[in-house]
Image: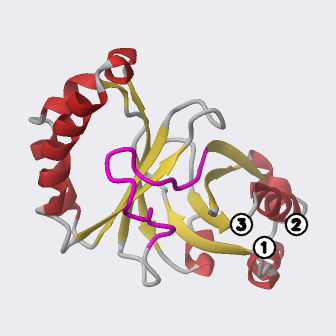
Amino acid sequence: MSYHSYIFLDVEPSICKLSSAKLKSAKKAFAACVKKNSDVRTLSYATLLMRPNTRFMLYFRAETPDAIQLLMRDLLRTPLGAHLRITYTLFGKPRPSQYNPNHPPKESVPDEPHRYLVVYPFTKTIEWHLLPYEERMNIMKGHVDVGRKFSSTISQLLLHSFGIDDHEFIVSYQMDALDDFQTLVMELRGTAARKYTKNDLPIFTCIHMPLTEALDMI
């Protein structure tokens, strides 16, 4: 199964020293570096004003974590990369659900991404993991039933980060209307599973756009 990484980037003050022509050339070289890499699927999102210390986000998907790491290395070595800093990362991979093991995990975001992406890390409490399996499964059924009500307008991707990042999961949702997602979250707050949430912050709201447009947020 593939590996997924969300890389949030901001600019260094040194970027202000670049002329307009040099900045334009640097953006072009950065985009070309992404385009020529066929081992990593890349999507780009603007995050300016949605979260402090981030201008844009790159979503990577590859068969190995090494491929993602090498692409990020090459991007940081570009003229633009010299003026960027990574401010937050999320890293995980899909796995079959403990509560529906016969259902294959979703591998990626839709081929045609929605306008908005909301992504955040998620960790359950110790008490949750100590509950009997049947009890956890029944609690999750109520949680899933709420989510299914919004399945026609919201696409979800669940990644596991146990042992390979600070949290247990990465949860991401795609939608064309943020109101739909906000309603979903409000309804999920009333399910029994909520009391077993240890942490689900920070929340990143991102706007999908071509890389050339995302780089214009710099």
Marking on residue 78: 2
**Residue 16 quadrant:** bottom right
Amino acid type assigned to the residue bearing label 2 in the image: Thr
Q: Is residue 127 magenta?
A: no
C-alpha distance separating marks 2 and 1 = 6 Å
Query: Image check: 35 left or right of 101?
Result: right
Assign the C terminus to one quadrant of the image: bottom right
Q: How many other residues sit within 10 Å of disc 2, few (<14), some (14-19) or many (≥20)?
A: some
C-alpha distance separating marks 3 and 1 = 22 Å
Residue drawn at (40%, 33%), measured in percent from left and top? 201
C-alpha distance separating marks 3 and 2 = 24 Å
Q: Which residues are magenta?
A: 90-109
Q: How far across and down, in percent of the image, does residue 84 sit?
A: 75, 53
Marking on residue 63: 3
- Report helix, strand or loop for mark 3: loop
Marking on residue 85: none
**Residue 131 quadrant:** top left
Q: How far across and down, in percent of the image, does residue 161 sit?
A: 56, 41
